Amino acid sequence: MNAELCGNFDFLRICLPDESGERATVELSTIKNYKNYCPDENCDTDLDKITIGFLWLLEQYFTKYPKKGRDGNNTNPIFFIHIAIWLSYKLNQKLGHKFTKISDFYTNSIDNSSKYRQFTSDAYRYSGLDDFIEKQTDLLNINIKDLSKFYHASKLICSMYGDFSPNINKDSLLNNANEFVKIYQELETNFKNTNDSSCKQILSALLSDYNVLKNKSANITSLPEITTDVPAYISRVTSSSSSIGNRLFTVNNKELKKYFHYIYANINKQIILFVIWISETSSKTKIKRKNKKYKEENESLIYYSKSSDYSMNSNNSDIF
């Protein structure tokens, strides 16, 4: 996640307010390319509006980062996780139990609907959206009611990004961070005993987003630490012919765990790589017991490198 992508959610909340009964201050029809989402200009139902919002968010992402499908590199879909959370919240709020899973919504309201055929046809052809969606099966099959419970935490991530722009608001940032930590720990407790790996994946993604912000504010104000057993969210770029690289891992070594709670690559504005190499001694070691000196050839190299890249891969610098 980043500030620009969060801005898309902030704008959508103006058009489709979070609170039931709250009036929109900006009409949804003002979004760019509105006719792409509502070709018959008859989109007045809650389902129509939610679908338009969902498709618009997808287009913002795939337009800015186009090579996510068959013809480009796939990366972990953290931004898509936030889209799914927003969508589940709105579906649960407005439509109750009409849909149980997002996959039901997507199949019935988008894939099988002639209204969005032009949009999906173009999106599938140029961005590989269909290929991308197929790889999100686990996420899309989470119960909508469960997925919507992550919404407040997701929204707070964007609120914290907003606290950095245009000028840092330390008090608001700290308040939002404290609220996020509280909600995150409640979510972790609620889903602790679940066998659903997708819920744990969402917790990991939210934690990674928070750690990005925590590092970003390190020279400004200290944000609270989150102590958790949830594995870090790993991003690994793969080719389009292979599945999207979702990697969750736990550091098993107790000493490493003590000092490095979360180790992850290509996620919060830096790459941390530890390589420990000990060369073989080039000759036999000779030891003499009395007043003789001993010589042992042992060469060690510890390489520690950092990078300022804020992306999942070198081509898309600030995707998540």
Image: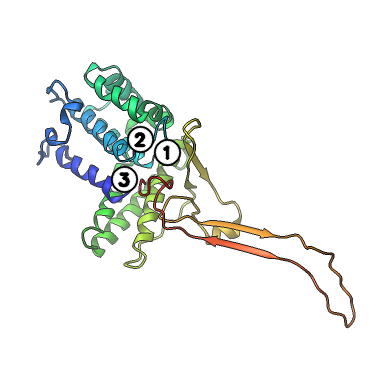
- What colour scheme does the image use? rainbow
Q: Do the residues labelled 2 and 1 touch (CB within 8 Å)?
A: yes
Q: Name the spot of residue 295 as percent of width and height, x first.
A: 81, 73
Residue ID for mark 2: 146
Left or right: residue 80 compared with residue 251: left
The quarter holding residue 151 reads top left
Q: Which of the two labelled residues, at mark 2 and mark 1, occupies the earlier sequence position?
A: 2
The quarter holding residue 21 reads top left
Mark 2–mark 1 Cα distance, whole angstroms, equals 9 Å
Residue ID for mark 3: 154
Q: Name the spot of residue 288 as percent of width and height, x first.
A: 89, 75
Mark 2, other Cα within 10 Å: few <14 / some 14–19 / many ≥20: some
Q: Which of the two labelled residues, at mark 2 and mark 3, occupies the earlier sequence position?
A: 2
Q: Is residue 65 above or below residue 173?
A: above
Q: Name the spot of residue 226 as percent of width and height, x first.
A: 42, 56
Mark 1, other Cα within 10 Å: few <14 / some 14–19 / many ≥20: many
Question: Could you tell me if residue 115 is visible in this image?
Answer: yes
Mark 2–mark 3 Cα distance, whole angstroms, equals 14 Å
Question: Could you tell me if residue 18 is visible in this image?
Answer: no
Residue ID for mark 1: 199
Mark 3–mark 1 Cα distance, whole angstroms, equals 13 Å
Q: What residue type is labelled 1?
A: Cys
Q: Is residue 29 above or below residue 113?
A: below
Q: Nearer the viewer, residue 19 or 6?
A: 6
